[in-house]
Every structure is written in C-alpha cells, then in structure tokens.
Amino acid sequence: DTGVSQNPRHKITKRGQNVTFRCDPISEHNRLYWYRQTLGQGPEFLTYFQNEAQLEKSRLLSDRFSAERPKGSFSTLEIQRTEQGDSAMYLCASSLDGVALTSAREAFFGQGTRLTVV
Amino acid sequence: AQSVAQPEDQVKVAEGNPLTVKCTYSVSGNPYLFWYVQYPNRGLQFLLKYITGDNLVKGSYGFEAEFNKSQTSFHLKKPSALVSDSALYFCAVRLSDNYGQNFVFGPGTRLSVLP
C-alpha cells in the first residue's frame, strides 16, 4: 500500500498519560500535515512540515503537544499529560508541493488514529 | 485569515436527482479550493480541486465543482446522485502565498441520497 499510513488506528489511554502517534507519508511527498477531527466536525489544523522543518503550528497546539519529522520522512505526534478534551481523531496527510505555488497539490489523508482518553 | 463556510449541515436528495453541496470561502488572496469526501471511520478522500484556469472542474465519481470568484463560492455538483454518494463532504481552501499553506476545512455537509 503506497498511501499514508497511521499507527495505531485506535488508542485508549488514561488521563495524564503520554501518547505518541506515528504517520508514514507517501514516500516522495515533501509536506506532512497533522489535523484533529472531532465527531461531526471538520478537520482542524494542528501543524505542518516541509521536509523536516516544522513551518507552522496552530494555536490549538498547546505545550503538551509536540510533533517531529526527523529526516523528512515519517512523523510523530506526542501528547503529554493527556486530558479528556484530547479525545478525537488525529489525521495525518501528505502532499507534494513544488517551488511554484501553481504546483500546489491536494493532500492525501491517512485513516487516522482515534484517541480516547478515559 | 481564511475561512470556509458550508451553509447546509445536511443535504438530502433522491437517487437519480442532481445534487449540490454548497461552499463559500473567505481569503485575502487567490484561493486554491478542494473538495474531500469522508465515509464512516475512514480518512478523507480527495475529490477535486481548483487551482487556476477553467472555472468548472471535474473530479472523481462524476462530481464537478464550479469556482465563482465574484460570489466566492465553490459548489460541488453531480448530475445524478447515487445511494453510495451518501457521506460527509468537506470543502477546503489553501492560500496562494508563501505562508499559511495549510488546508482550512469547512464544517462539513452530510449528504444523504435516498433510494
């Protein structure tokens, strides 16, 4: 399968625990995005990477959230001291964007990691 | 800041009838516009995009959308709906400048196609 892969698919954790999610983008894609989606809502932007550089972070991304993309390949999203409000679907997406903005490409999404904090 | 509105939470149509899912946007520059579909417990699937050129764009599964700059709209259409089109549809926008190139999504519209 050459699509975007996210692991785990489901995670149940106790409040206060730390969790880490992994995203493997489509191999040649240079951009990687993290979004959060709650039931019946549209995805909310969290952060994105251009290769290994984290270029933008949303105000939604509190100090408890950290994301990395070492070597510009896979990415991890860590949530420390989880809270019940962190329960959501965490979506990863990747895209191939050239230097010229007219080459902007659509993002391809993984199936998400559903986090439940109890 | 850019934003996307989908004025209808839900759209219901009979199978075989044309469907329209509405989207309007607000950006301070030239927009790149996208439609995605989401089936239950699945990620988002790309349907179509407008970057530049012809205002009418065609996408997957017989869907099309028309970019209207004066009305800042990008409505999704299909001439003949199928029951299998029932899903959650999201409109998204990206800015065509050097910053803020993430995708901003609308709240979604649930399409129900009745047999």
Image (cartoon, coloured by chain):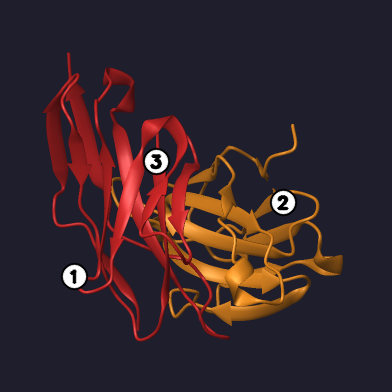
Chain colours: A orange, B red
Q: Give the CA separation, mark 2 to mark 1.
A: 36 Å
Q: CA distance from mark 3 to mark 2?
A: 19 Å
- Amino acid type, label 2: Pro
**The disc label shown at residue A25, or none:** 2
Residue A42 lies, with reference to residue B64, above or below; the image says below
Q: Chain of mark 3?
A: B
State the residue in front, B20 or B84.
B20
Q: Quadrant of the C terminus of chain B?
A: top left
Q: Secondary structure at mark 1?
A: loop
Disc 2, SS? loop
Q: Disc 3 or disc 1, which is closer to the eye? A: 1
Question: Can see residue A116?
Answer: no
B90 horizontally vs A36: left or right: left
Q: Few, some or many C-alpha atoms within 10 Å of disc 1 (few <14, some 14-19, many ≥20)?
A: few
Task: Kindly check if marks 3 and 1 are in contact, taking CB atoms under 8 A apart as contact.
Answer: no
Residue B59 x, y percent position in the rendering: 45, 41
A39 left or right of A13 in image: left
Q: At label 1, which amino acid type do we have?
A: Gln
At horizontal 13% and vertical 28% (from top left) the residue drawn is B13
Disc sitting over residue B71 in the figure: 1
Residue sitting at x 38%, y 32%: B62
